[in-house]
Image: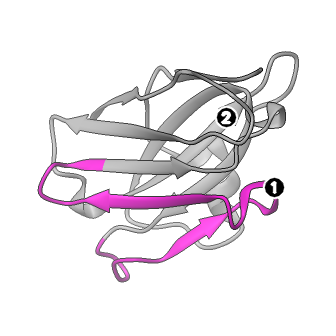
Amino acid sequence: QVQLVESGGDLVRPGGSLRLSCTASGSSLDSYAVAWFRQAPGKEREPVSYISSRTPRWGTTYYADSIKGRFTISRDKDKNMVYLQMNSLNSEDTGIYYCAAIQGWLADPFWQNYQRYQYYGSGTQVTVSS
């Protein structure tokens, strides 16, 4: 069993930055691919980014077109955490951000399907407003 807890959400002004964290407990994340999703008020949950596990190889990342070039996903294997660095935030980035994990890996575009994951966090609120 893997427990995931997101943190780092906050109120930030347009153009600002935040770093979200997804902390895992119960198991090492080394064999789990992790993704970030978000859900804005009144909208469906959407994929944001994905980072691979050691299978098939470390370091494969995917990004949604809407955040490409502004967000960066990374992982700290020693701390058992995954991060989402978010820069140049705008109001469209407002929402609850969730991390999700799956043992193994998912190819593009399958990583975008929230239902494919095995474990989920409860989310952290990001609000971008002046």
- From the viewer's perspective, is residue 71 above or below residue 126? below
User: Where residue 103 appears, x then y in whole percent?
Assistant: 35, 56
Q: Report the residue that reaches farthest toward the right.
A: 42
Q: Is residue 114 left or right of residue 21?
A: right
At 26% from the left and 62% from the top, the residue drawn is 31
Q: Report the residue that reaches farthest toward the left.
A: 78
Whether residue 63 appears in magenta in the rendering, the answer is yes
Mark pair 2, 1: CA separation: 12 Å
Dot 1 corresponds to which residue? Answer: 66
Whether residue 82 appears in magenta in the rendering, the answer is no
Magenta residues span: 54-81
At 59% from the left and 73% from the top, the residue drawn is 107
- From the viewer's perspective, is residue 77 above or below residue 85? below
Disc assigned to residue 38: 2
Q: Nearer the viewer, residue 87 or 79?
A: 87
Q: Can I make out residue 1 in this image?
A: no
Q: Is residue 108 left or right of residue 73?
A: right
Of labels 2 and 1, earlier in sequence is 2
Labels 2 and 1 touching (C-beta < 8 A): no
At 33% from the left and 76% from the top, the residue drawn is 55
User: Where residue 44 appears, x then y in whole percent?
Assistant: 82, 29
Q: Nearer the viewer, residue 4 or 106?
A: 4
Q: Can I make out residue 119 in this image?
A: yes
At 61% from the left and 50% from the top, the residue drawn is 87
Residue type, numbered disc 1: Ser
Q: Is residue 97 left or right of residue 39?
A: left
Secondary structure at numbered mark 1: helix
User: Where residue 89 appears, x then y in whole percent?
Assistant: 70, 42
Q: Report the residue that reaches farthest toward the bottom.
A: 57
User: Where residue 42 appears, x then y in whole percent?
Assistant: 88, 16
